[in-house]
């Protein structure tokens, strides 16, 4: 048997992401110049090394956050890929647009924000067909979600697809898995 590959583009970044980029570049330049000035002042002033180091660490964290945001905004876009192979299927999430503003709903714990931040990168999940009965299509809140369980986590497939496309993909996957494994889903 052969593998079947489905490829689709992920969501586009909203206009705010593009509008914020020049402002972040200017802010980063100003932050860097002020950081150089801060280093000169800290070395000249008679303060303890622990205060100097704490100021520099704080400054570095601010720089790192802005650089990582710029990276996620400007990096090349990668599509999602679902490969249905004999015995397993593999899902590559592709790259997500940086959209942390719409990702934050109210007061979220830092753990959830970190998961949102980490979820922007390309991840590959592989699931064996006998475990594919964990494939599911259901309505959660206002959205219909196609997902499978991998390593104890729900992994959504095709979050940028329309509902009819998601239903079609689910029917194809379900049919293929049932034909290969004789496992009803």
Image (spheres, rainbow, N blue to C red):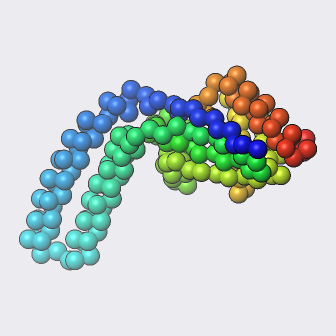
Q: Nearer the viewer, residue 160 or 118?
A: 160
Residue at the (74%, 27%) spot, across then down: 167
Residue at the (76%, 37%) spot, across then down: 173
Query: Horizontal placement of 53 versus 121: left or right?
Result: left
For the question of whether residue 106 can be seen, the reply is no
Residue 36, percent across and down? 14, 59
Image quadrant where one finds the N terminus: top right
Q: Would you identify the image quadrant in which residue 4 lies?
A: top right
User: Is 151 drawn above or below residue 26 in the view shown?
Assistant: below
Q: In the image as oriented, which residue stretches furthest toward the top?
A: 164
Residue 113, percent across and down? 52, 49
For the question of whether residue 125 can be seen, the reply is yes
Residue at the (66%, 48%) spot, across then down: 90
User: Is 45 drawn above or below residue 63 in the view shown?
Assistant: below
Query: Horizontal placement of 114 versus 164: left or right?
Result: left
Q: Nearer the viewer, residue 49 or 114?
A: 114
Image quadrant where one finds the C terminus: top right
Q: In the image as oriented, which residue stretches furthest toward the front?
A: 1
């Amino acid at each position: 048997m052969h593998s079947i590959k489905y490829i689709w583009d992920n969501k586009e970044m909203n206009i705010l992401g593009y509008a914020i980029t020049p402002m972040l570049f200017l802010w980063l330049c100003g932050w860097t110049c002020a950081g150089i000035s801060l280093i000169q002042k800290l070395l000249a002033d008679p303060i303890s090394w622990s205060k100097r180091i704490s100021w520099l660490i704080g400054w570095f964290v601010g720089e790192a956050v802005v650089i990582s945001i710029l990276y996620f905004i400007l990096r090349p876009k990668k599509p999602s890929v679902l490969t249905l192979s004999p015995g397993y299927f593999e899902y590559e999430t592709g790259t997500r647009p940086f959209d942390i503003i719409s990702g934050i709903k109210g007061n979220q714990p830092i753990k959830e924000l970190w998961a949102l931040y980490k979820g922007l990168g390309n991840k590959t999940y592989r699931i064996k067909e006998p475990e594919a009965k964990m494939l599911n299509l259901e309505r959660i809140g206002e959205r219909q979600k196609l997902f499978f369980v991998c390593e104890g986590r729900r992994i959504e497939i095709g979050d940028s697809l329309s509902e009819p496309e998601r239903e079609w993909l689910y029917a194809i996957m379900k049919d293929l898995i049932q034909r290969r494994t004789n496992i009803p889903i």
